[in-house]
Amino acid sequence: MTQPPTLPPAPPAANEPGQEAKDALWADIVRQLGAEIAGPLSAALERIHGLISTGQIDRQGLRALRESVAAAREAGMVGQQLGRLASGRLNITRERLHLTQLMRNVLAHRSRETQARGIQVRQQFKPVEVMADASLLFSLLNAMMDWALGSTHSSIDLRIDLTPWPTRARLSCRFAHRALELLDSGRTHNEALPSTDTLAWRLVEQTALAMGLQPVRENEAGITVLTLEFAFAASEDAAESSAGDLPAAGRSTTAATIDDLPEYPPSANSKPLAGSHVLIVSPRIELRRQIQAAVAHMGLIVDVVDTVADAVQFCAEGLPHGVLFEASLSDEVLGSLQPEVAVEVPDFCWVEVHDEERVTQLSTATPDGVARIARAHLTDALPSLLTFELSKSH
């Protein structure tokens, strides 16, 4: 039997339309990443040399050193998330998600941070559901807040509504990226505006593009507006309320088209919790290292403190998405920190780590809402436990 002719191999990715532009964009991102890490580290190194030569450092110098190291660390963590997007290993799925509730959950987690910075966040939300990948949407909303908080001088205006026909869910973020007194002084058109093309913006942009969204950013007179439009998952009530603005011939089309989409499985994204932030509370270095090793492959942002007092101070500046603490600190953590956090985030992730052997328990199976795990089970069970616990508020 004659064998069919062998097909020529597919052309390399570099020959795909637009691939050259993509390569140039990622080259620019890599250069920017290097600059945003090297700049703060160079400043930190200069201060360290000054400390070595003089043997003295004042409180202001120590604070500047800490801020430089923190800025380099933050750039490195953003680089990790950008690397994840550039890897091409994302397994993107879509499911019905409540965009408004997710945005409110993110704001609840970030409320301490916004208050500490003196930034007001104004909200104007309609209840809207969208079709999107759960983990990427959570990452996108947090990245947007990181970018806006790092760029604004006063306040952030967030709005969720629906576009006219064809109906889509629209999220807009508006803020002033220069001081208000400069906006009012008439110098706006004569002075260069501070750039909003930071590494944080690159993460917003690339996360949106990975989700199939087209981020639209407008800068004018010191005001920046980001607009994102999502596939709208219409309920019957929402469809009826929006149908009044549609042509009669098309009123039933939108709801039927979106609602007839097939059911999608839960997100199986590579490192679905990448960018989520956890705090480890333990005075024992070996336990902290064991926990870090157990979650090293998950793409989490991990911070560690020795005491509950340090954890309280840490959380006062901004809540992580979860706290893992050793059982010997349980009374202090649950007595002081947990009630305070529960007021802002009722479904906050708490994980108690025990030295002795015990059954792994999810928070849904304990009366106090705290998940529990034995130290011996960290390697095999902690990643799954955290995936469940951190996903509760996503």
Image (cartoon, grey):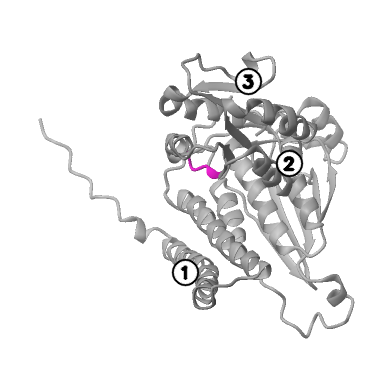
Q: If the image is split into quadrants, where does the C terminus sit?
A: top right
Label 2 sits on a secondary structure element that is: helix
- Answer with the quarter of the image where residue 138 lies: top right
Q: Residue 48: x percent and y percent?
A: 51, 71
> Looking at the image, which residue sits at the far left?
1
> Looking at the image, which residue sits at the far front?
55
Against 106, residue 67 (above or below) is below
The residues bearing labels 3 and 2 have C-alpha atoms spaced at a distance of: 23 Å
Residue identifier under label 1: 31
Labels 3, 1: front one? 3
Q: Which of marks 3 and 2 is nearer the N terminus?
A: 2
- Residue shown at the point (48%, 52%) measured from the top left: 80
Q: Residue 324: x percent and y percent?
A: 58, 33
Label 1 sits on a secondary structure element that is: helix
Residue identifier under label 3: 363
Kindly identify the amino acid type of the residue bearing the numbered disc 1.
Answer: Arg
Label 3 sits on a secondary structure element that is: helix
- Answer with the quarter of the image where residue 63 lies: bottom right
Q: Give the range drawn in magenta.
A: 298-303
Kindly identify the amino acid type of the residue bearing the numbered disc 3.
Answer: Ser
Q: Earlier in the sequence, mark 3 or mark 1?
A: 1
Q: Residue 28: x percent and y percent?
A: 48, 68
- Residue shown at the point (72%, 49%) measured from the top left: 317
Q: Earlier in the sequence, mark 2 or mark 1?
A: 1
Kindly identify the amino acid type of the residue bearing the numbered disc 2.
Answer: Met
Nearer-the-camera pick, 328 or 389:
328
The residues bearing labels 3 and 1 have C-alpha atoms spaced at a distance of: 43 Å
Q: How crowded is mark 1: few (under 14 residues within 10 Å), some or many (20 or more)?
A: few
Which disc is residue 103 wearing?
2
For the residues bearing labels 3 and 1, Cβ distance under 8 angstroms: no
Against 26, residue 381 (above or below) is above
